[in-house]
Image: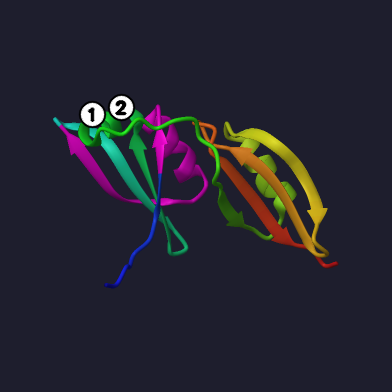
Amino acid sequence: MEFKSPQINLYVSDLAASREFYEMLGFKLTFTAEVEGQAVHHEFVLDGFKVGLATKESTHKIHGLTPGANSGSEIVLWTEDTDLAVQYVLENGGVLLSEPHDFLNGLRSGWVQDPDGNPIQIVSRTSG
């Protein structure tokens, strides 16, 4: 048995708002699934990393799943300047979870959340 092409899927309430948010971060749309002419799932890629967004409603209707509160995972985005990147996300509708701060001898990190509350860690290396 061989597994391949991993990706993370997030269950979202507002697919259009989530698509706009992830495109603002630089993710490129690669696939859209439609049911009865309505988009219910998008897939994106950024630097080889794949993330899917699926509506909570369609996940329940099609697969019988009932997604709960978003917790227990995060997406990590590396950047050259954490403070500048966090500010960019906030100026474009993101919500701050944790101010940028230094940790682990040479890393700087801050957290924002997407429109459905999924945490995104924005991290960079510092000169220290």
Q: Decide whether residue 30 is among the magenta residues.
A: yes
Query: How far from the left and from the top, in percent, is residue 73?
Result: 54, 46
* Three-letter amino acid code of the residue under disc 2: Glu
- Crowd band around label 1 with a 10 angstrom C-alpha radius: few (<14), some (14–19), many (20+): few
Q: Decide whether residue 96 is among the magenta residues.
A: no
Instruction: Name which quarter of the figure residue 13 lies in.
Output: top left
| Quadrant including the C terminus | bottom right
Instruction: Name which quarter of the figure residue 50 lies in.
Output: bottom left
Query: How far from the left and from the top, in percent, is residue 8?
Result: 42, 51
Against 22, residue 14 (above or below) is: above
> Which segment did they paint magenta?
10-35
Against 95, residue 100 (above or below) is: below
Separation of residues labelled 2 and 1 (CA atoms): 6 Å
Residue that numbered label 1 is attached to: 61
Query: How far from the left and from the top, in percent, is residue 85?
Result: 66, 48
57 or 25, which is in the foreground? 57
Which SS class for mark 1? helix
Which residue lies at the image location 48% right of the left edge and 38% below the top edge? 21
The outermost residue toward the left is 36
Residue that numbered label 2 is attached to: 57
Which residue lies at the image location 27% right of the left edge and 72% below the top edge? 1
Instruction: Name which quarter of the figure residue 41 lies in.
Output: top left
For the residues bearing labels 2 and 1, Cβ distance under 8 angstroms: yes
Which SS class for mark 2? helix
Which residue lies at the image location 17% right of the left edge and 34% below the top edge? 35
Against 106, residue 88 (above or below) is: above
